[in-house]
Amino acid sequence: MKINIYEKFIKQNKITDLHIFLTFNCNKKCKFCYQKNYSKNTLNINKLKYYLEEFKKINFIPNKIIFNGGEPSLLKDKFFDYLNLINEYYPTIYKSINTNFTANIEFYNKIIINGINNISINAIDLNYNKLKKIIKNRLATYRLNYVVESDSNIKKIFKLCYNKKISLTICNNFINEEKVDITTLLKLDNAIKTQFFLYEKYLLKDYVFFTCSFNKMGRTNSFSILPNGGYTNKFEIIRQGK
Ligand code: SF4
């Protein structure tokens, strides 16, 4: 009997999740970005359908599905073609998107209505009012990784996340310059120990905004579909941004 290469790959690598990198293109150039390139390739939707058909044959059901990038919202309305396709195959599986929060409010509300369960916002210079408006929609959960470039919003954002029980990672970009008094924020409530954490050494280490774990060999537990149509579980290949 012919061995299905995807089944072999999934079993051998203990794959649990599906990551879909629709594009590595991005409208930001964060200094902490894990990508080495920002290729404008966009995943061919027929290629995605091909993978989904293959997964169906081997009954692969991921624990969760993450839309990743680059910035997935740059696809604008086209994003919903991919999301709808995923919904056809995996209507009840938990779906999340990683975004830099630069799309408009309508986009975020629409993805929630169309089945995204969680929005992970990796952002610098957050628009507080936009954040407040979007998190009103309690049909989704939110996670916020906030890199503090200036202190204009931080207290308001902290309180909003605390009140709404949104997981918040504060990354202090000015750790050596002490422009933001994180210590004062941390004193706001003891519950911070469970709801929030602080990643002070953010810029100093290999920390990346990547929502799956990877082992010492740089292999993730995810089947990652890349914009060029390839697939991998190796972080270094994802990092190439092609
Ligand atoms: S971290 Fe995200 S938002 Fe920033 S440049 Fe990289 S892909 Fe774009």
Image (cartoon, helix red, strand yellow):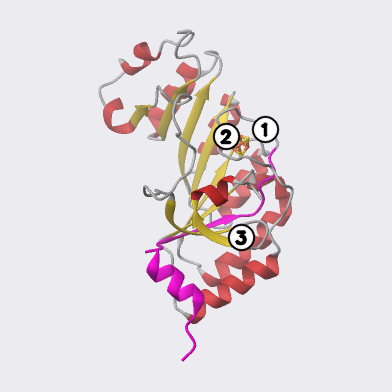
Instruction: Name which of mark 2 and mark 3 comes first in the sequence.
Output: 2
Q: Is mark 2 within 8 Å of ligand 1?
A: yes
Q: Circle 2 sits on which residue?
A: 33
Q: Secondary structure at mark 2?
A: loop
> Mark 2 or mark 1, which is nearer the start of the sequence?
1
Q: Is residue 40 left or right of residue 159?
A: right
Q: Residue most toward the bottom?
A: 1
- Say whether residue 89 is left or right of residue 107: left
Give residue 106's quadrant in the image: top right
Could you say which is closer to the camera, residue 26 or residue 229?
A: 229
Which residue is rendered at x = 66% and y = 58% of the image? 80
Queried on whether the Cβ of the residue with tag 3 lies below 8 angstroms from ligand 1, the answer reads no
Question: Tag 3: Cα neighbours inside 10 Å, few (<14), some, or many (≥20)?
Answer: some
Mark 3 or mark 1, earlier in chain: 1
For label 2, count other residues whose C-alpha is less than 10 Å away and answer few (under 14), some (14-19) or many (20+): some
| Amino acid type of the residue tagged 2 in the rendering | Cys
Q: Which residue is mark 1?
A: 28
The question of residue 2 being in magenta is answered with yes
Q: Is residue 198 above or below residue 109?
A: above
Which quadrant of the view contains residue 71?
Answer: top right
As shown in the figure, which amino acid type bears the numbered disc 1? Lys
The kind of secondary structure element at disc 3 is helix
Q: Which mark is residue 102?
A: none
- Circle 2 or circle 3, nearest the eye: 2
- Whether residue 60 is visible here, answered yes or no, is no
Does mark 1 have its CB less than 8 Å from ligand 1? yes
Residue 32 location in percent, x, y? 55, 30
Q: Residue 69 magenta-drawn?
A: no
Look at mark 3 in the image and give the residue it sits on.
83
Magenta segment boundaries in residue numbering: 1-26
